[in-house]
């Protein structure tokens, strides 16, 4: 299959991760077309429209023409400008996928997208986290993946220095409970002087991963689900705090057929403070949870398993 993924900006690098995993584990080909650069995360680029010269524009048209599957991410569709063209003239004979990642416009107005896909008869719908299933009935959850075998996603030894480092890497602080985390850290400053917050903000992704890798604990958010920050830190063998609710937890267990999940659950400031007290004061507990996190990503939430699931989805497109 020849897959073309299209997005304004690569959502948390997921497009590149999927493309590379498809090439690593299958004989299918995948190209990623993007039109914007947001933040300073320096995601890998493929056919990035602003960078294309005349030869690149010809290549883009050839890729669109040859595609078997158009896989649209976030708000993208066939009318999104791709420089001098759109995907619309190339739709004939293609399978079409719409894949949502929690963009704020989609979260605020899911009915618009529900109606759009209903009216167009589009039924190949994916969401990246379980909570979005409630906003797009009929969609399938395709869990995001990380390449757990790569060194930057693996545990790294560090020399003990008496500090317990807590990583937090919010793309948007207003959506990631950053204010709650800062308030709790201030509250615990006198009680846990060894706790050191590593707030990772607006840096290239490779630098974010390296800084996170040097930490002991990671805080994702308390919105009821999880983000890429969780998956990265779990793979690196950190104890990861997130506010997964019961429904999201049950959906994850059902999808993967597992009983135990590695996250440390905290759903409000009090629970977050208690979780940090336990983890900071008990290095054995911290290490055991981190080891369980790594095992989970190596044996359950694997790149190979998730890309196989995506390929089965592609093979059954309507």
Image (cartoon, helix red, strand yellow):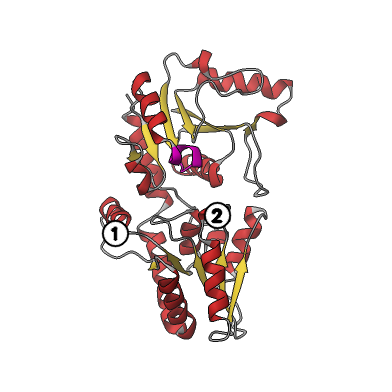
Quick one: quadrant of the N terminus?
A: top left
Residue 267 vs residue 155: left or right? left
User: Could you tell me which residue is drawn at 49 percent across and 81 percent down?
Assistant: 280
Which residue is more in the foreground, 29 or 226? 226
Q: Is residue 287 visible?
A: no
Residue denoted by label 1? 246
x then y, percent, for residue 290: 44, 72
In the rendered structure, are the residues bearing label 1 and label 2 in contact, judged by CB atoms less than 8 Å apart? Answer: no
Residue denoted by label 2? 174
x then y, percent, for residue 9: 59, 38
Q: Secondary structure at mark 2?
A: helix
Q: Is residue 20 magenta?
A: no
Q: Magenta segment range? A: 100-108
**Residue 258 in the image: above or below residue 283:** above
Which residue is more in the foreground, 24 or 286? 286
User: Could you tell me which residue is drawn at 58 percent across and 33 percent down?
Assistant: 8
Q: Earlier in the sequence, mark 1 or mark 2?
A: 2
Which quarter of the picture shows residue 282?
bottom left
User: Could you tell me which residue is drawn at 66 percent across and 54 percent down?
Assistant: 202
x then y, percent, for residue 55: 71, 21
Q: In whole angstroms, how far apart are the C-alphas of marks 1 and 2?
A: 23 Å
User: Could you tell me which residue is drawn at 29 percent across and 52 percent down?
Assistant: 251
Which is closer to the viewer, label 1 or label 2? 2
- In the picture as drawn, the residue positioned furthest to the right comes out as 53
Q: Secondary structure at mark 1?
A: helix
Which residue is more in the foreground, 180 or 291? 180
Q: Is residue 84 visible?
A: yes
Q: Is residue 105 magenta?
A: yes
């Amino acid at each position: 299959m020849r897959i073309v993924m299209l997005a304004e900006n690569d959502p948390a690098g997921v497009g590149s991760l999927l493309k590379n995993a498809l090439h690593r584990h299958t004989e299918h080909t995948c190209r990623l077309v993007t039109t914007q650069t947001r933040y300073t995360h320096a995601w890998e680029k493929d056919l990035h429209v602003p960078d294309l010269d005349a030869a690149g524009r010809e290549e883009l048209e050839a890729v669109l023409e040859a595609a078997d599957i158009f896989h649209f991410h976030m708000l993208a569709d066939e009318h999104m400008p791709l420089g001098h063209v759109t995907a619309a003239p190339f739709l004939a004979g293609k399978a079409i996928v719409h894949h949502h990642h929690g963009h704020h416009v989609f979260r605020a107005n899911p009915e618009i997208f529900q109606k759009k896909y209903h009216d167009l008869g589009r039924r190949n719908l994916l969401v990246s986290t379980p909570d979005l299933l409630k906003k797009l009935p009929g969609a399938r959850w395709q869990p995001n993946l990380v390449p757990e075998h790569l060194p930057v996603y693996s545990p790294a030894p560090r020399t003990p220095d008496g500090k317990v480092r807590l990583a937090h890497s919010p793309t948007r602080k207003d959506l990631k409970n950053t204010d709650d985390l800062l308030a709790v850290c201030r509250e615990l400053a006198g009680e846990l002087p060894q706790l050191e917050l590593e707030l990772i903000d607006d840096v290239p992704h490779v630098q974010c991963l390296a800084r996170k890798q040097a930490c002991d604990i990671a805080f994702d958010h308390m919105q009821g689900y999880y983000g890429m920050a969780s998956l990265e830190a779990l793979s690196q063998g950190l104890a990861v705090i997130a506010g997964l609710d019961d429904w999201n937890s049950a959906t994850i267990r059902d999808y993967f057929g597992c009983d135990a999940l590695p996250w440390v659950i905290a759903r409000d400031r009090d629970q977050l403070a208690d979780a940090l007290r336990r983890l900071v004061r008990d290095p054995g507990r911290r290490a055991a949870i981190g080891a369980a996190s790594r095992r989970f990503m190596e044996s359950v939430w694997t790149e190979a398993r998730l890309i196989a699931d995506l390929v089965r989805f592609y093979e059954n497109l309507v």
